[in-house]
Amino acid sequence: QVQLVESGGGLVQAGGSLRLSCAVSGRTFSYYAVGWFRQAPGKERAFVAAISWNGGRTSYADPVKGRFTVSRDNAKTTVYLQMNSLKPEDTAVYYCAGDLMGGGSSHASYDYWGQGTQVTVSS
């Protein structure tokens, strides 16, 4: 089993920054790709970013490219999502998820999910 716990969400003004953390415990963390997804009220869960098991490959959804950065520290078994230049449309619950097979942009690929952390961006 793999457990993921997100933290770092909160309320921020447009143009501000937040850093989300995803602490992973359980099976060997370094084998897992990790993805970030978000879900706004009334909308489907959407891909945000993903990072490969060794951090060598990252991918981003178009709406966040150039503003968000995903990284990982395998020694701390933690994945981070640095969010800059936040916009009101970034408001959502953010989830991290783990996948042994390589991750990607489809939420169906991920086997383990955290409980989510709320990010609210005011205009």
Image (cartoon, rainbow, N blue to C red):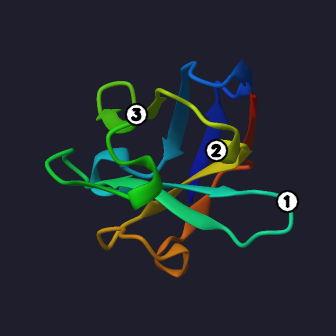
Compared to 48, does 94 lie above or below?
Answer: above
* Amino acid type, callout 2: Asp
Identified at 49% across, 27% down, the residue is 85
* Amino acid type, callout 1: Pro
Identified at 53% across, 37% down, the residue is 22
Q: Secondary structure at mark 2?
A: helix
Q: Is residue 61 visible?
A: no
- Name the quarter where the N terminus is drawn: bottom right
Tell which tag, 2 or 3, sits nearer the viewer.
2
Q: Secondary structure at mark 3?
A: loop
* Amino acid type, callout 3: Thr
Distance between the alpha carbons at the discs numbered 2 and 3: 26 Å
Distance between the alpha carbons at the discs numbered 3 and 1: 30 Å
Compared to 28, does 21 lie above or below?
Answer: above
> What residue is shown with label 2?
90
> What residue is shown with label 3?
77
Distance between the alpha carbons at the discs numbered 1 and 2: 12 Å
Graded by Cα atoms within 10 Å as few (under 14), some (14 to 19) or many (20 or more), the crowding at tag 2 reads: many
In the depicted view, which residue is nearer to us: 67 or 72?
A: 67
In the depicted view, which residue is nearer to us: 55 or 42?
A: 42
